[in-house]
Amino acid sequence: MVLNIAPCVLVLISRRYYSAGFPKLKGSYEFKKETKRVKVSLEQTQVDEKSGVVLFDIAPVIEITDETGKQYRTTLLFEGTRGTVVMELTGKPVSVVVDPDCSLLHTLDFNPGTELLAHTLTHSPSVPHRVWAAKELIKARTPRSSVNRMTEHTRTNPPPQNGSYQSLKVVETAMQAEKFYGVVGETTSALAKSKSPFALDGE
């Protein structure tokens, strides 16, 4: 039996499975309370012509859960390196996940905010997504002024909950309840690499 496959299909297959590299996605998130609309944008950042890393023909699924527990799914299509989806909800979003079924090989740099990441870390049944949420919380930047104030005084008078400190407290609480060793191990490794003064301080 001879398979007659169109040349354009062969190109798509070869780019997805045989080209160098893999999709590296960077995301942004916006929620407008007035209209209850969520906008999620993704950008493919891996493109490098000199290294032969191309733009991949992918269509990641975006899943959002609102405060009522209702889930919304849509597919994001890229136009060039960027793609955007807008979803109208009936309630406030509590989590947003890229590739909820873990069907796409990729890396993701995407922080939709501490509240949404915390919900994913503590409620998602998916191990990869709990790990992602923990790592994004750990990556939250610490203001330089806060780093400069990290003295013995902070052990009994912790700084205000601003970004990194608040995020690490969320991670600490979640890890105390986390039952899967893989999540704890990945999170511990990310904490060590972060060298955050709040993490090192032990608060």
Image (cartoon, rainbow, N blue to C red):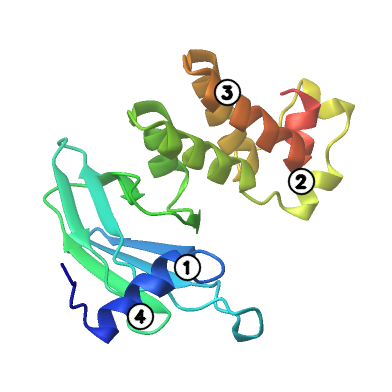
**Cα gap from disc 2 to disc 4, whole angstroms:** 51 Å
Q: Which residue, as the protein is rendered here, is positioned at the far front?
A: 1
Name the quadrant of the C terminus.
top right
Q: Which amino acid does label 4 sit on?
A: Val
Residue 190 at what x, y percent from top left? 67, 37
| Residue found 77% across the figure and 20% down from its top | 156
Q: Residue 11 carries which label?
A: 4
Q: With 75 as the anchor, is 107 left or right in this view?
A: right
Residue at mark 1: 18
**Cα gap from disc 1 to disc 3, whole angstroms:** 33 Å
Whether residue 34 is visible here, answered yes or no, is: no
Residue at mark 3: 184
Q: Nearer the viewer, mark 2 or mark 4?
A: 4
Residue at mark 2: 146
Residue situated in front as seen by the camera: 14 or 26: 14
Tag 1 secondary structure: loop
